[in-house]
Image (tube, grey):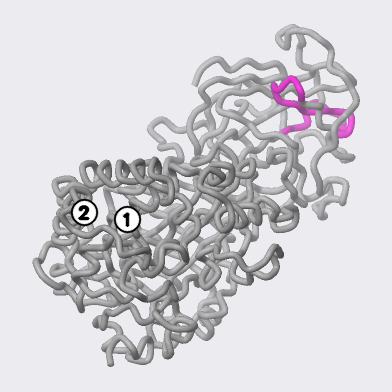
Amino acid sequence: MKNIRTRARKCTNSLGLFLCAGLLVLLGSCAADDEGQPQSQNDAASLVPSDASIEEAEPEEHERSSGLVINEIVSRGGDWIELVATGEEPVKLNEYTLVDDKDERSPALLPERTLNPGDFFLIQALGEEAASELPFVPFKLGGSDSLTLASKGEIVDFISWEDHVSEGSSLGRLPDGSGAFQVTKPTPEAPNELWEEGQAPCIDPFVTDKVLSIQIELSSEAWAAIKANPSAKENQEADFIYEGKKVEKVALRTKGNSSLKSVANNPSSRFPFKVDFNEYVEGQSFCGVKKLSFNNGFKDPSFLREYLAYKVARDIGLPASQTAFVDLTVGGEHLGLYTMVEIVDDDSFLESNFGNDKGDLYKPDWPDGHLMWKSANYEDYEDFSIENNADTSDHSAFMNLLDVINHGSPQDAEKVLNVDTMLNYAAFNAVFVNLDSYTGNGHNYYLYEQEGIFTIIPWDLNEAFGRFTCGCNSDEVINFLIDEPSCGSLEERPMLHILMQNPEWVEQYHQHLESIIEGPFNRQNMEEWLLEAANLIRDHVYGDPTKFFSNQDFEASLVTEGKATGNTMALLPFVSERINSIQQQLQDRLPSSNEGQGNCGQGGVPGGGPGGGPGGGGNPKCPDGVCDAFEQAHPEVCPEDCQ
């Protein structure tokens, strides 16, 4: 960090927000008034713009006086500003304004509140379209930015910073209210603490060179409630412990479809989970991440499908989640090896992949997930959900997407769709025969809108490498048709069908195929990544007390020629044979199309029959053609597969 400029000092009262040190985030108490009571309604909103002007002058010319000063700021991973009252007299907040360095910004007037000397007051920096019951300013803080605190049009405090240190640290005055700004440990509404030498800042939590130790602690009553009705997916309050560092008051719930149903009616507690750091303490995050998914390895004896598929997806430029391996304990029960996955409907994911989180984010699902036209009324599509702007979106952009891909010409597609990403996504799914997706059963993907243009985002890749067969036999999986990369008719995937009608885009799609199989998916890369990851997790696999498959299944699923479990090929032989098939299809030595009928003749219906198959109970992955060890032990999960 360099170039911290300042004039003034001090702190405030309020929420209790972000603490992340050495991969740690903590939250403290709620906002309170001077007597410890909840804040008034005047505090529970964006600080209103002030019509006061700020004197034109260089900030350095203004000397600090007693009163209110900026005491600490965090500008990455949960932006906030801490003010403190100095001197010997009470301070009226509504005599002050705050603004950052954007020319067009209006200063934000602080709420009607009186601070006693030494009181801290915490303000979130959430942006223009945010909503919060706690005080916030309508702008965010950047890694290089400035803040101006003014009173009656005159600057009373100013800080400017460049190349701010990474997440997990703050800039704070030492001593509080009067000292120079230094790199500090985030201490909202508490005295500042110097950043200890060698103390690791909060970094990307998705560590890839170790299996992380994570414990989720909750009351016995809360854990019993989850186990009594896991399908309810109800939040329970818990504490999250990452490598020994605790985050309090997080929301824990079950998640998933077939991965949850596989254990919901059985004695096993190996549920898939979702953790939300922001549910109970607004603005709380874990090193900038507000939500995490913990996947239980359902249908994957290798434990590696998600890790490898997401790795390739990110490598080829798709907006795809990060992952990490974790050894998970919940409610005192050691559940074993899970995959931790970055959640798409987290604003940190959208900001890092798209530069903002303001667009509409949709998660279509089967049977409407193929985006076939039903009507011009959004409410008629029961299986669409909007994940972020439900109260503000009129869905007009999304309905325009549906109209164009179903009724427009290929030339119109670029007006509503990020064409290159869609072609890259289709190529990725074709290479991995990833049919638990838009191109397969109309499931497990997101669409993010920016200025009317939608980008597809992959999700839930645990059945990549042909694990979800969509009714294909093993030969049909390996020779999956690249020019009709759908399970059933290509026309029933209009978002892809409209693109494949344009010869230039077909060529662009072929180029993506070649780039994938010659780049990250080539055998040498995949073998190196696979064996490295297998060696990393092997001891944890063997020590996993609740895993779905045996140790022998794990080893056989890696490099063994032939069928590892059921009719599913081991990972490395799949890579070799799939590359060979794609190369031959590109050279016209193998068929690459099927007169528009796609692959395997399932017609695109999840499970090959109405509602997920006659015995699937609405499960889009039943049947999938695989009678695996878990289904043999629990035939009620999907009886069709093991008939």
Give coordinates of residue 552: x percent, y percent.
Answer: 14, 74
Asked if residue 536 is positioned above or below residue 565 in the image, the reply reads above
Give coordinates of residue 18: x percent, y percent.
Answer: 59, 45
Q: Residue at x 55, y 61 (%)?
A: 363
- Residue type at numbered disc 2: Gln
1 and 2 marks in contact (CB < 8 Å): yes
Give coordinates of residue 388: x percent, y percent.
Answer: 64, 54
- Residue type at numbered disc 1: Asp
**Residue 578 in sight from this viewpoint:** yes
Q: Residues within 10 Å of mark 1 (few under 14, many from 20)?
A: many
Asked if residue 583 is positioned above or below residue 490 in the image, the reply reads above
Q: Is residue 87 magenta?
A: yes
Give coordinates of residue 126: x percent, y percent.
Answer: 68, 41
The magenta stretch is: 83-104
Q: Point out which mark residue 483 bears.
A: 1
Query: Is disc 2 placed on a helix, strand or loop?
Result: helix
Kindly identify which residue carries mark 2.
585
Asked if residue 334 is positioned above or below residue 164 in the image, the reply reads below
